[in-house]
Amino acid sequence: MSAKPQLPPSPKDNKFRQALGLGIGIWDYMEKNQRELGGTFTLMLPGQGPMVWTTDQKMIKDILNLKEEQVDASLVQLPMDLGEKNTVFLNEKAHQDSRKLVIPSFNTTRLKARAGVMHDIVTEHINSWKPGDKLNMPRMVGDITLDVICYTLFNLRHGERKERYKHLMLYWMLEATSDTMFTLASAVGAKRFRQWMNKKYLKRTAQRKPGDGKKGLLPWKRAVDLKVQLADMVREDIRAIRARGDMEETHTLSILCRATDENGQLLDEERIISESIGLMIGGHETSAATAAWFMIWLQQKPDVNKKIRDEVIDSIRKEGHFDAIKVSELPYLTACLNESQRVTPSAVGFIRWLRYDTQIGDWLLPAGTAVLPNIYLTQRDPAIFGPDANEFKPERWLQGGGKFAPSEFMPFGGGRRACVGMNQARQQLRIIFAELARRVEFTSEFQNTTALPRSRMIGGQTEPEKGVWITVKSVRPENFGFEDAKNTPAEKLSA
Ligand code: HEM
């Protein structure tokens, strides 16, 4: 007789309490379940199938090795109408083909070519600050990320069109991932909800009714207005790029405009709009949340911040200038960001929906189950990272190579659906934090505590509940450490 599929144990809380546990204080809730049920447990949420979270290495390896045909990504519980042909929702060959369309935008040559502009963008932001300014770290990095996206996707650096793109991207993202939208999507099923929103968007586009972009009586009105307006702008750009026919253009939208589908046809406009919008949101809240936690660690550990500053100044000394590519490869800075993403990852898990009954580790799980490697708990597992696994110690990445397996360190997910923007995100965050350490002194409430604030889900990412408010104490000039870099001791430059 064949074995019957089974689910790992569940907490006693009802479905609504479980949903609340995931929404507010998700890390505490994960730890509580691990204490009570072990590293593998099932959560049952309203309007969804079972969700199996695991820290078990055998299970995680099986999840990373799942084949395209074993999973159904269209079931992802995302309320945003990205278009159902977006990479995130596609399956099997269509998914792999779709990744191939966007991956060339993030290859090493293109990233290196962008490093200098990323640095210019960070410099512009820092130059606009003065002592006493109060900044909320995730929103500030979100803003830098939008500037980078406007450049990489649309080749826009300044001007009204760029500002309009930024405005629409930000407000559409906020609107489309609001708690209300998540609630509506879980009430009717996220896929059905997205398809319904997409119909509204297509109808309004066909009628040429972009709306006023204001809130209305219907909770989805503003999200539809903003999507129509944003898509209209992308459509105008697609038409302009195709009319120019300039094969030398290298920004991502131009690459998508020249790309062909599996039948050798140029991609249709809606497909390009869908992928562009996906790339806009893919890097935004993820980078903002990652930076928020990293800033807290640096505020709590000024010695670490100082070591980063010294490393950056050493690099300036060696190169004679701020070389954004060299800086983004600095070992101590890299170790610090890795360590922050290890202990305080922005994604608590990554998800795969099983199409069939599937053997994952020692469990035969039923079709329709979602399985998630538990990034947060795994990356704090003493069996992998040692007895100091809960501590922030960048040195663990430097001593003995700091090599951890893809099933042990996975802030960008893994396997066939791993994050396509990983290298861009890492490069951008390293440039931001190198310049913050070199040029800006901050004060904040985090300097006086070793405790981390409670976490909360924002746009699907785990962020400090009340943001990360920091006050600018002083801003050093742009050329700080350049002229005298060759002769001045690092101690003096960073005083
Ligand atoms: C610190 C920043 C970022 C973090 C922590 C992050 C994290 C993740 C994670 C956990 C996944 C799911 C992977 C999986 O299921 O295995 C993912 C997927 C994805 N990310 Fe990122 N991401 C970041 C930045 C970016 C950027 C900058 C972009 C693009 C500009 C991007 C584009 C995507 C896309 C398109 C996917 C879907 C891939 C697929 O379904 O095949 N991400 N990301």
Image (spheres, rainbow, N blue to C red):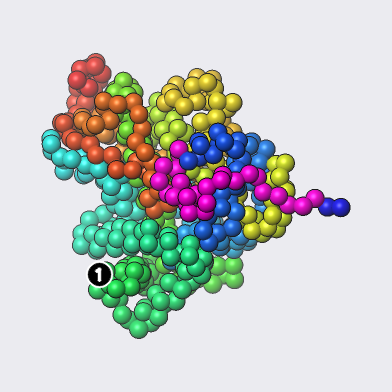
The residue indicated by pointer 1 is 214
Foreground: 338 or 139? 139
Q: Is residue 111 visible?
A: no
Q: Is residue 8 visible?
A: yes
- As drawn, 286 above or below 190: above
Residue drawn 53% across and 61% down? Answer: 47
Residue 44 percent location from the top left of the image: 56, 53
Q: Specify the quadrant of the image occupied by residue 473.
A: top left
* Amino acid type of the residue tagged 1 in the rendering: Lys
Q: Is residue 11 magenta?
A: yes
Residue 27 percent location from the top left of the image: 45, 39
**Kind of element beneath mark 1:** loop
Extreme residue in the left direction: 131
Foreground: 329 or 271? 271
Q: Report the side of 279 relative to 95 (left or right).
A: left
- As drawn, 232 above or below 137: below
- As drawn, 242 above or below 449: below
Residue drawn 37% across and 50% down? Answer: 458
Q: Report the side of 173 relative to 417 (left or right).
A: left
Which residues, given as a range, are shown in magenta?
3-28
